[in-house]
Image: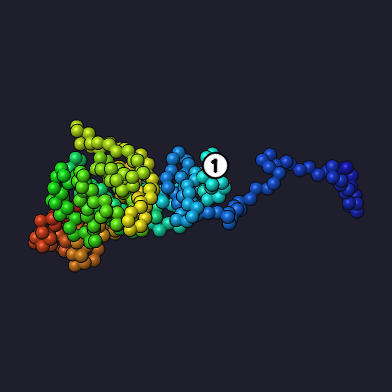
Amino acid sequence: MSWLDVDDDDEPEFDEADIRVRPNPKANRPRTKRRPAHADAQIARVLGVDRGRYAVLLDEDGENEHTAVATRARELRTQPIVTGDRARVVGDSSGDEGTLSRIVGIEERTSLLRRSADDTDQVERIVVANADQMLIVVAAADPEPRPRLVDRYLIAALDAGIHPLLVVSKTDLADPTEFLTHFEGVDDLQVFRSGSGDMPLDEVGRHLVGHSTVFVGHSGVGKSTLVNALVPTADRATGHVNEVTGRGRHTSSSTVSLRYVGEGGRGWVIDTPGVRSFGLGHVDPANILKAFSDLALVAEECPRGCTHLPDAPDCAIIEAVAEGRLGDRGAARLDSLQRLLTTFA
């Protein structure tokens, strides 16, 4: 029947054969953007990441505490999942061989330690989530200590709201006293000295109980050796320093959470790969001065908007250093501060 054959007063007649429906080539059910609520999801701690698979700990501190392997849900393909995250897990989380659960969400993070490739790189790389302490390991010698690298660790920690600790290793090779004068003005910085056969395990351990502590340090400073001593089951690879270059070899290739068990209780040790640089491109420049708390106190007398750079007029810090009011370390501290501030100027 054609519309040309129909009179104005007539109505066309149709039957089911006249209806043409284009089939959905993907599915018969219409697509939807609504995701399942996953009300049955369990909360798990992400212990480590290896080639797209996540080691997770379920029922933490419970009677059924156990580990399982998980993959990420498709909807989280652009969401970074890192060691220390608290993840929502569904599927087979029994941990039996061959089973695989699925991470469908990440709980709100309490802290996020980040670094960038360099100070001009705005792309941040997440180191660890939900840590509340950072233990910085630096060698007194072999390799030589780098105070400016430690300054960068302190800035990153304070920017993330993480409390810093400092361990100086290999004190049997050199006296770190002069090196440590650089940090005398940092408020509430607990310092531990460690030598061959004389590691302060009990002392450090007391500060690990009840905390999630991320261990950071230059390659070859003995960080993994300290981790293995604190957590005997860790079995983290250790290396040596190249006699020609004076640089350590990267031994730990991944970030992993390890359970610390001490006389006073338990905590988490998060070991990270050794790094030779720690970019601060992601850091709020206003937080740089926080790592120099002794200078920040003097800076309260600076005029508003003071940059604290060499050409800053009436800078109270520059005047205090020139007058010798900050002691022998004042000039070096100011130089470190200005080098970092120049990056963001």
On the question of residue 145 being in view, the answer is no
On the question of residue 69 being in view, the answer is yes
Residue, x 45% and y 51% (percent of image)?
45
Q: Amino acid at mark 1?
A: Thr
- Residue 185 in percent (x, y) is at 18, 59
- Residue 314 in percent (x, y) is at 16, 63
Q: Is residue 160 left or right of residue 29?
A: left
Q: Residues within 10 Å of mark 1 (few under 14, many from 20)?
A: few
- Residue 111 in percent (x, y) is at 38, 56
- Residue 119 in percent (x, y) is at 30, 47
Residue, x 47% and y 41% (percent of image)?
52
Q: Secondary structure at mark 1?
A: loop
Residue, x 88% and y 49% (percent of image)?
12
Q: Is residue 75 left or right of residue 152?
A: right
Q: Residue furthest bottom?
A: 301
Residue in the foreground of this view, choosing between 83 and 36: 83
Residue, x 45% and y 56% (percent of image)?
61
**Residue bearing the label numbered 1:** 99
Quarter of the image with the N terminus is top right
Which of the 4 image quadrants contains residue 4? Answer: top right
Q: Residue furthest left?
A: 323
